[in-house]
Structure formats: C-alpha cells, structure tokens
Image (tube, grey):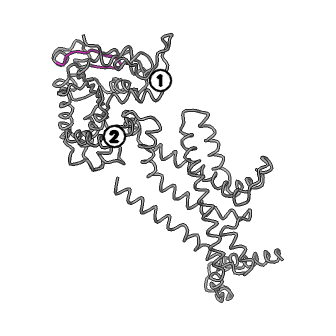
Amino acid sequence: MLEVAWTLRCLMLHTAFCVPYLGRGDIEKAPPQFMDYTWHFQIVWEYRAVFVRGAIMTAQITFWATLIGLTLGLALGLMRRSQIVLLRAPAATFIELFRSTPVLVQLVWIYYSLPILTGLQMSNTVSVTIGLGLHAAAYFGEIFRAGVNSIAKGQWDAARAIGMTYTQAMRRIILPQAVRRMIPPFINEFASLIKLTTLGSAVAVNELLHESNNLINNTYRPLEIYTALAVAFAVLIYPIIYASQRLERRWQLRQ
Amino acid sequence: MTPAMIKARNVQKYFGQLHVLKGIDLDIVKGEVLAIIGPSGSGKSTFLRCMNFLEEYDHGEIWLGDELVGYRKSANGKLAKDGAARIAAIRTRMGMVFQSFNLFPHMSVLENVIEGPTIVQRRKREEAIEQAKALLDRVGLSAKIDAYPETLSGGQQQRAAIARALAMNPEVMLFDEPTSALDPELVGEVLDVIKSLTADGMTMVVVTHEMSFARDVADRVMMMDDGIRVEIDAPEKIFTNPSHARTAEFLQRVLR
C-alpha cells in the first residue's frame, strides 16, 4: 500500500515539476492540463493540526540544537584561539570535520553508526537534535572566533592595563563588542539551521517536511502541501530575520 | 636618596630576530616625571609597554617598588613567568594611556571610568561613580559622562581615557604617545590635563613627540635610539647641550 502511494506521489511530482520544463521557451503552448490545475488549499486548512504539530517539532529541534550549538560553539571558538595546542587542535579538527561533510551524512551517521560504536541508542529525534547541534556548533564556533578576532588589539591592551584577567576582559570588554558583529552571521546560520531540520525526515523525525510527506501520501496533494510547507517555514524564519535587522539598526545607532 | 619607584635593569626584548630593546637601565623616583623621546622604531613605546608587562621582556628585570614585574624569582635566581592573576594585580598599580585612546566603545564615558574600580578592584559602585564624576570634572568632561566614546572628539576621548586610568588610583601613570593621534588643535587640552597631574606629585612616564612638553614638564628626559638609552638628563641639558651626537641630530630634525 505504502509503495503504491510512493509511486503515485513520485509520478505526481514528476508531472508537476519536470514536465513543464519540456515546454519551456514557449509558455503559451503549455499543455492544457497545467492551465486547468485546480488548487485545493482547503486541504491544508483541513489538516492544519498536522502542520502545527510539525512546526512545533521543527521549533523544538531548532531550539535545542541552537542551545547546543551556542554553548559548544562558544567553547570551540575560544579553544580554537587558544595558545595551547591541546585545546586548539581538537577544536579545529571538530570544526573542520563538521564543516567539510554533508549534514545529511552526519545525521544518518549519528543515528545509525553511533549506536554500533558506542552501544548508545538514542531516539531519532534526539539524535537529529544532537547532530544538528554539533553541526551548528562548528559554524557558531567559527562565527565566535571571527567575531572575537575582529575586535581591535587596543581593546585587549586597555582591558589588561586596568588589571583585567583574560576572563574578565573577554566577558566584559571583548565579547559584548564581538557579539554585536556576530549577529548577522549568526542569524544566517540560525535560519539555515531551521531549514536543515527538514533533513530529520531522513530518519523519520516528525518535523514539518516529514509530516507534509505523510500528508501527501494520504491526500495526493503535493503542490498545495509543499506550498503550505514553504509558507510555514517563512512564518517561522522571517520574524527572526526581521528582529535581527531591527536589533542591528538599534545597536548601530547606539554605538 | 629615595628608593626608586620603577627600576629597570638590562631590559631586553626581541620581536623574533629583531632586537628592539638592547639592555635598558632606568630608575624613576616617586613623583618624578620622565619623558622618553627618540625617533620612531627606537623602542620607546615597547619599553613603556614592558613596564606594565603588556609586552613581555625577554631579559633583565623591571621592578615596581619591591615587586618584580611579570616574573617570579626562584631560589636559584632564575626568572619564571608570573601567574596571570599576579600580573593583573601589579598592572592595577600602573595607569596606562594609549596613543589610540582605546576607550570601550560599548560603554558610556562614566561606565568606562568605573569599569576598573568596580570589576577589577571590586569597590562599591556608588563610591566608584562618585570618584569617576570627580575625575571627569577634573579633566573637563562633566557634561559628557553619559556620552558614548564615538560621539567625542579625540581630545575628549583621551581625557576620558586619562580619567579611566586615574580611577584605579595608580602609583604611576604611563603615557604612550598620548597626543600623537590628535588633531593639532586638540593636543593642548590633553597636555594640560597631564601637566595638571604633576601638581599632585604623580609619578609619570611619558613617551612623547611633543618636545616643548618634555622640556617644560619633565624632570628628566630620556633619549632612546635603536633600542638603547642614548642619554638621560635634565631637560635643560638635553635640549640645550646634549652629550650625544645622536640626540643633537634627532632634536635638530624634530625642532626645526
């Protein structure tokens, strides 16, 4: 039954997405069945609970992955700036490993291979959350590092000259300035992280994409549902982008 | 004779292969104002930065009172780098003012001044604010206590930076070319503030290109060239009858 549904869905996607390209270059002559397509958006409304459920899961995964990413990323960023090789080298290895491999592979690997190596079996949701958290940590780590490095050396001098220790200087003088410069790249990374949660569908996590695919299997309405999916992501992400732009502008005025 | 407040013995410093300080000796007594002059690249700023260990010297010793700066002497007489906390602690006894001001841009002028007292010295906030207001009044910035550094002129920023350094109640003030980054018309207001500190008997070391300031304010002038202390003497002597050809040549170039 499931296979039939898959085949059908693939066929429908094929017709919907690929066939139009055959007629590209002469839009007027597009085959009549595309012009005749009737949208049934009421189906989205009917199944709105599914979208809400998916959105909550997506938000949860994003929240925890961000938390892991920020905490670990800060540590990684600081470690990578360290004079001590034993701190610097592992951080650099971790960051470059996660930056140079596909996220999908990381997630699948953590879900399937980690239990074999460690005997530690995590639920699909937890492993995707952790996987995305580690992935985010690698990128956030680089953002932290670049942000801290961008602060003029004179700020360190001034902080040290009034007797601050490294920790005090970092916490009171360097990070507050660096964080402001980190906001734009951080928001980029965060928005990208929200979208990366869709990769959770690869290990059947019930986030937005997976819920949508399930719904398509039941309703055979991929166009409406994917449209709604796009809207759902925009609704999740745009406010964050907007807020960050406001914040940036306010800090620019203040400083 | 009064014991030296700052004592430097054979201070040497390398930047990689480059020998920037080739053995500097110096004694500064309490209340003395010392001006360090010399061509750029002569090592005068580096030497000043060694005094509060912003720059680590490689040989020799620098003493503040009876404390060795930056190093610990072990039983066999060898020097080992001191712990970060002790280095930080000794720095609180010296105020430093930089060529590029280096105010903290995310803090108001008042916050800049109370940062050290409240965070490093853990003094009461109210008391720190009171002192900061008095200091800012003294440097003529009463009207600017809530302003952010970038809204201030260079001269105002440097005066705020002087107040920030004074707020730590330092025993010595170190000035690293405090007027070099200023527009000519703003130099005077900063020099006036520095001059006014002599009235309190503040011990000061000033690396400067302002020869008239060195002549009028300093008790002694030290001429440096190529990492060497060429000579050190009273300003009248240095500026009218220097003992070394290098000093004479340098002064001829800058005083033209």
Which label sits in the foreground, 1 or 2?
2
Does residue B256 show up? no
The residue tagged 2 is B124
Q: Residues within 10 Å of mark 2 (few under 14, many from 20)?
A: few
Residue B119, position in %: x, y? 39, 39
The amino acid type found where label 2 is placed reads: Lys
Q: SS for tag 2?
A: loop
Picture quadrant of residue B194 = top left
The quadrant of the rendering that contains the N terminus of chain A is: bottom right
**What is the chief secondary structure element of the magenta stretch?**
strand
Q: SS for tag 1?
A: loop
Are callouts 1 and 2 both on one chain? yes
Q: Nearer the viewer, residue B196 or A93?
A: B196
Residue A25, position in %: x, y? 62, 78
Residue at 17% across, 23% down: B215
Q: Nearer the viewer, residue A36 or A127?
A: A127
Residue A65, position in %: x, y? 61, 56
Q: Nearer the viewer, residue B180 or A71?
A: A71
Q: Earlier in the sequence, mark 1 or mark 2?
A: 1
- Indicate left or right for B122 with A89 as reference: left
Residue B176, position in %: x, y? 30, 30
Please determine whether, in this image, residue A252 is positioned above or below residue B82.
below
Q: Residues within 10 Å of mark 1 (few under 14, many from 20)?
A: some
The amino acid type found where label 1 is placed reads: Asp
Please provide the residue range marked out in magenta.
B223-235
Badge 1: chain ID: B
Residue at 59% across, 62% down: A194
Residue at 64% across, 77% down: A49
The residue tagged 1 is B82
- Indicate left or right for B136 with A254 as reference: left
Picture quadrant of residue B231 = top left
